[in-house]
Amino acid sequence: MSKVPAGLKYSKDHEWIRLEGDKAYVGITDHAQDALGEIVYVELPPVGEAYDADEEIANIESVKAASAIYNPAAGTVAEVNEALDGSPELINTDCYENYLYVLSGVSATALDGLMDASAYEEYLKTL
C-alpha cells in the first residue's frame, strides 16, 4: 500500500503538490516512485520558465523506464531541487521530502481540480 500523506493535492498522473504561502512544491507520489523502481536520472525544468497545468515539465529515468512529469498547476518555476542532480535516488528514499521543483504564482483555486489524499487513495484502487 502506497503512502498518501494528508495535506497534499494529487494528480491522476501521480504528482503531488503542496502550497506553502506563495510557493507550490511539486514531486511524484510514493505509487509513482515504486512503479518506476530505482531512479537514476532526473531532468528538471529551467528556473524562470512558466508552465501550464498538465504541461510536460520534467522527466525521470529509472532502471525500468523513462517517465514524463506533468505540471499539476500553472505557474513559474521558482527553484529546482538541486540535490537531485547528483542523487536522483533521494526520490526513492522519500518522495514527499524530496520534491522536484517549486512553482510561484500558484493560487489555491488552481488546486481545486486535484484530488485530496482520500480521493487519491480511492483512485489508486482503480488502477
Image (tube, rainbow, N blue to C red):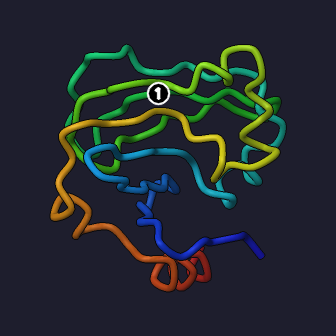
| Left or right: residue 100 compared with residue 57 | right
Image coords of residue 89 (percent x, y): 80, 32
Q: Is 44 rendered above or below residue 35?
A: above
Tell me if mark 1 has few (under 14), some (14-19) or many (20+) residues whose alpha carbon lies within 10 angstroms of its own: some
Residue lying furthest front: 21
* Disc 1 secondary structure class: strand
Q: Residue at x 51, y 85 (%)?
A: 118
- Please indicate whether residue 36 sits to the left or right of residue 122 in the image: right
- Left or right position of 124 against 31: left
Quadrant hosting residue 92: top right
**Which quadrant holds the N terminus?**
bottom right
Quadrant for residue 77, please give it: top left
* Residue behind mark 1: 58
Q: Nearer the viewer, residue 47 or 56?
A: 47
Looking at the rendered structure, the kind of residue marked 1 is: Ala
Give how far across and how far down residue 64 sits, in percent.
Answer: 79, 35
Compared to residue 24, the image places residue 12 above or below, namely below
- Residue 46 at x, y = what percent? 38, 14
Residue at 60% across, 56% down: 29
Residue 116, image x, y percentages: 42, 76
Q: Is residue 46 left or right of residue 81?
A: left
Q: Is 103 rendered above or below residue 49?
A: below
Task: Give the answer, above or below, for where 98 lies relative to 59.
Answer: below
Image mark count? 1
Please state which of residues 7 and 44 is positioned toward the viewer in this rendering.
7
